[in-house]
Image (cartoon, grey):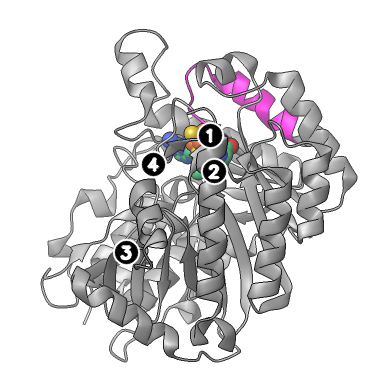
Amino acid sequence: MKVDLNQLNDSHFGISTLDPLRFAFSKKSSPHAGGMSMPVAADQQPKIFENVTSNSVSKSNKRCLYIHIPFCRVRCTFCNFFQNAASRKLVDDYFHALLQEIEIKSQLAWTQSGLFHAVYIGGGTPTDLSPDQVEKLGKAIRTSFPLSTDCEITLEGRTNRFTDEMFDKALEGGFNRFSFGIQSFDTKVRRSAKRLDDREVVLERVAALSARDEAPIIIDLLYGLPYQTLDVFEQDLHDFLDTGAHGVDLYQLVVGGSAPMLNMVEKGRIPAPATTPDKASMYERGVAFMNKHHIKQLSVKHWARDNRERSQYNSLAKTYAEVLPIGCGAGGNIGGYGLMHHRSLDAYMDAMNNGRSTIAMMVKQGPTESINAALKAGFDSGVVRRSALPRFKGQDTFELLKPLFVIWSENGLVELEHDYLVLTLAGSFWAVTLAQGAIEAINTLGPRKTMSTHPHGHGHSGKGHPAKMAS
Ligand SMILES: C[S@@+](CC[C@H](N)C(=O)[O-])C[C@H]1O[C@@H](n2cnc3c(N)ncnc32)[C@H](O)[C@@H]1O
Ligand code: SF4
């Protein structure tokens, strides 16, 4: 048995070109790869959730907690993840409901029977909570959930209004990792994207927080924004280095349907974002920069300056770990089911106020879910290891995928070693496309498509990155 190449095409293989980095595929369509899953009818969801969460888990299972804060004070023009404009009243009411949900979810037998190894507070902009709320949230997490002694507890957000008082309260609350969306330091790029604060202000803030050296400070940079030329991006990389931040994510800009940027470009108010080949050149520049400065690569898009940065949540949530979702718009997976909470704030608040389930959507994960997760984790790390892939019906999955691997190798996307598939620079740029190709190749081994791919939600994913619901 081998994967059936006849059911696949160039969108899986890539094309044969002298320049695979820029032209192997036409474009990256989605930030995440996804597998097949079966929707669960709404009336069955509460019972299934009750069943899976009344079971105990083994202490050795790795688990994560994802808590979502669905507010931002200003919407960035490129963002696909914006949900609600923050107002004090809305945020305060939500925070109250969130603490209630934390209490309810913490009492489940499933929750208390094992340990959580990573917690991620994502958004939206969690740093738009008040300093007192941040401290309270950290303390609620630490007192309500069984955390491993080295549990990574990340607060995501922006440097705007992230004062020393906020940092102190967050540390007091128990947060031990901070991830700030910077996107670009360049003032012109920032203003056109409606980012708050100019270059000097952001540089100063990241440098000051990093210099305190009390917790890893990680920054997100985007590449491909309007006005962000290759030279501007190179300056962004130098700025990262100068701030002393402990880690950096380089994310390719992928603008989705509702992001305001598309309309602004259409009306001629700003230049178009970079094309895919131009973004590939920027990625190339980024990787060369990191190599030149001996910054350690943790994944195809994440680098750490020192060992303090472990990026636990990202690697765990992408693999076999279960993720308990909490909050409006949060996504996770427990006991073979993918869960997605109400994305509408009204629906979430209504559910919480009336003692109803916060789940808007549930899917039963497909039988190859553990293989899909291992593939995604492997491609994200830059190396797919034979030993890390669960077997498919007793057979060696790496071997089953070999025909596809050989084509990728011919197309300059991977180097195929005996037990390892190592991504080239081009393969690293196209890592999500390759992961999706491998997952679809695995699907050719099973019954023909009777299930559907599941939708996206916020939750466990590549950082900063709103996440996948089920896998
Ligand atoms: C959900 S956002 C939250 C971060 C925080 N609110 C901020 O604005 O800095 C997490 C990260 O997703 C990334 N992101 C947002 N929009 C994106 C897009 N259209 N394409 C790729 N990455 C994007 C950004 O790098 C951002 O830092
Ligand atoms: S990038 Fe961050 S602050 Fe900007 S709209 Fe998206 S989630 Fe909100």
Instruction: Give me the residue at 76% from left, 27% from top.
Output: 203
Q: Nearer the viewer, mark 3 or mark 1?
A: 1
Are the residues flagged by discs 2 and 1 in contact, CB closer than 8 Å?
yes
Q: Secondary structure at mark 3?
A: helix
Q: Which residue is mark 1?
A: 87
User: Which image quarter: residue 447?
Assistant: bottom left
Dot 4: element: helix
Residue 64 is left or right of residue 306, and the answer is left
Q: Nearer the viewer, mark 2 or mark 3?
A: 2
| Residue 15 in magenta stretch | no
Residue type highlighted by circle 4: Pro
Q: Nearer the viewer, residue 164 or 209?
A: 164
Q: CA distance from mark 4 to mark 3?
A: 18 Å
Outermost residue toward the top in this view: 268
In the rendered image, residue 251, in percent from the top left (x then y), is placed at: 52, 40
Between the residue at mark 2 and the residue at mark 3, the CA separation in whole angstroms equals 41 Å
User: Given contact means CB atoms under 8 Å apart, are the residues at marks 1 and 4 in contact?
Assistant: no
* Label 1 CA crowd tier, 10 Å (few <14, some 14–19, many 20+): few
Distance from disc 3 to disc 1, alpha carbons, whole Å, reads 44 Å
In the image, residue 344 above or below residue 237: below
Where residue 320 appears, as percent x and y from the top left, is 48, 76
| Of the image marks 2 and 4, the number of the one nearer the N terminus | 4
Magenta stretch, residue numbers: 221-240
Is ligand 2 closer than 8 angstroms to the Cβ of mark 1? no
Q: Earlier in the sequence, mark 1 or mark 4?
A: 4
Query: Are the two marked residues, 2 and 4, in contact with CB atoms closer than 8 angstroms?
Result: no
Q: Quadrant of the C terminus?
A: bottom left
| Residue at mark 2 | 91
Where disc 2 sits, the SS reads helix
Q: Is residue 79 left or right of residue 266?
A: right
